[in-house]
Image (spheres, rainbow, N blue to C red):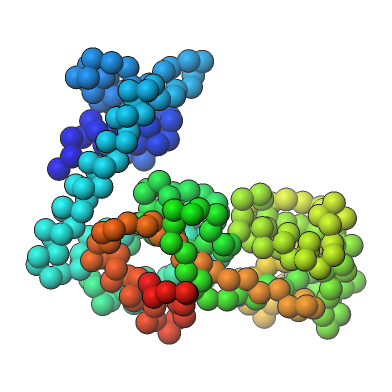
Amino acid sequence: MADRRLQVFHTVAKQLSFTKAAELLFMTQPAVTFQVKQLEEQFNTRLFERSHGRISLTPAGELALDYAERILNMTSEMEARISELTGQVSGPLLIGASTTIAEYMLPRLLGEFKRLHPETQARLTVANSETIENKVADHTLDLGLIESPSHRPNLITHVCCEDELVMICAPFSKVADLSCVSPRQIAEQPYITRESGSGTRECIDDFFRLNGVNLDEINLSMELGSREAIKGAVAAGLGVAVVSSTTVDKEVKLGELISVPIDPPLRRQLSLVYPQEKFRSKLLQSFLDFLESSPLLHVYGHSPI
């Protein structure tokens, strides 16, 4: 096992925050500080500059981080390879997903994977696409499912399925009776959108641009951080929104919301991202193989997963 002090230092260095590191490691902040101080005493040098409530890596800290990442990666590889001698797929699988995927697609997938491999434990982090991508890139997560193309060249990306988006409005809205709606018509209505960093927001903004609608032409009414908040605001008649059709089936059936197709259709590709590593654990590879063969998610790309 890697030195615990090295693990703590690595987490602090990646987060540049003792507080955030303590939360991720399930430790108290004084305990984290103590571990880092011990490592600094061993090396007889400072690893962090501390100024005005912020920290940054010293040159020695930068060097230590580079070695820490290599040591921790080798330790993980060793543990995985030794455990695989038993031939059993087991252990924790750290998955991140944006909200639409986490709530509407992953539960059935994870349930089926657990049935096939009962010794595994899936740990799911739900956040917007940008956050998930960052966590996969810094190895906090094993893999992520996001609602926009990856912006990280150090991640492998595979499109896993398509998702159609629709405009939603209140039943009493003046656009509720339309058989379809154009991007220009949507932009003219009081418009409710997700926050910056959301994969859904990025996809829709790109769609507007591609169809001749500048973002400053949109009649922006609200910017909300969750899909449920958006659905509630739309149902109250505060504006229209564009959402995944899979997320409003219940509300449409109950008559709480009206779903209107967009012309031209707005479809986005949902992507699977994971680090480019020469070694891939048997657990991660088993999950990737499972996704590729699952009828619930059709995984495809330029090369096999």
- Residue 44 rendering spot, x and y as whole percentages: 23, 15
How many marks can you see? 0
Is residue 26 toward the left or the right of residue 250 in the image?
left
Q: Name the one closer to the observer, 222 or 155.
A: 155
Q: Answer above or below: position of 203 versus 23.
A: below
Residue name at image x 29 percent, y 30 percent: 64
Query: Dividing the image into 4 quarters, which one contains the C terminus?
Result: bottom left
Q: Name the one closer to the observer, 106 or 70.
A: 70
Query: Dividing the image into 4 quarters, which one contains the N terminus?
Result: top left
Residue name at image x 66 percent, y 49 percent: 196
- Residue 218 rendering spot, x and y as whole percentages: 84, 56
The answer to whether residue 158 of the structure is visible from this angle is: yes
Is residue 53 toward the left or the right of residue 40 in the image?
right
Is residue 250 toward the left or the right of residue 120 in the image?
right
- Residue 208 rendering spot, x and y as whole percentages: 78, 63
- Residue 95 rendering spot, x and y as whole percentages: 39, 59
Is residue 238 toward the left or the right of residue 273 in the image?
right
State the image quarter where residue 179 is shown: bottom right
Residue name at image x 28 percent, y 16 percent: 45
State the image quarter where residue 242 is shown: bottom right
The answer to whether residue 21 of the structure is visible from this angle is: no
Q: Answer above or below: position of 206 versus 259.
A: above
Q: Name the one closer to the observer, 37 or 278.
A: 278
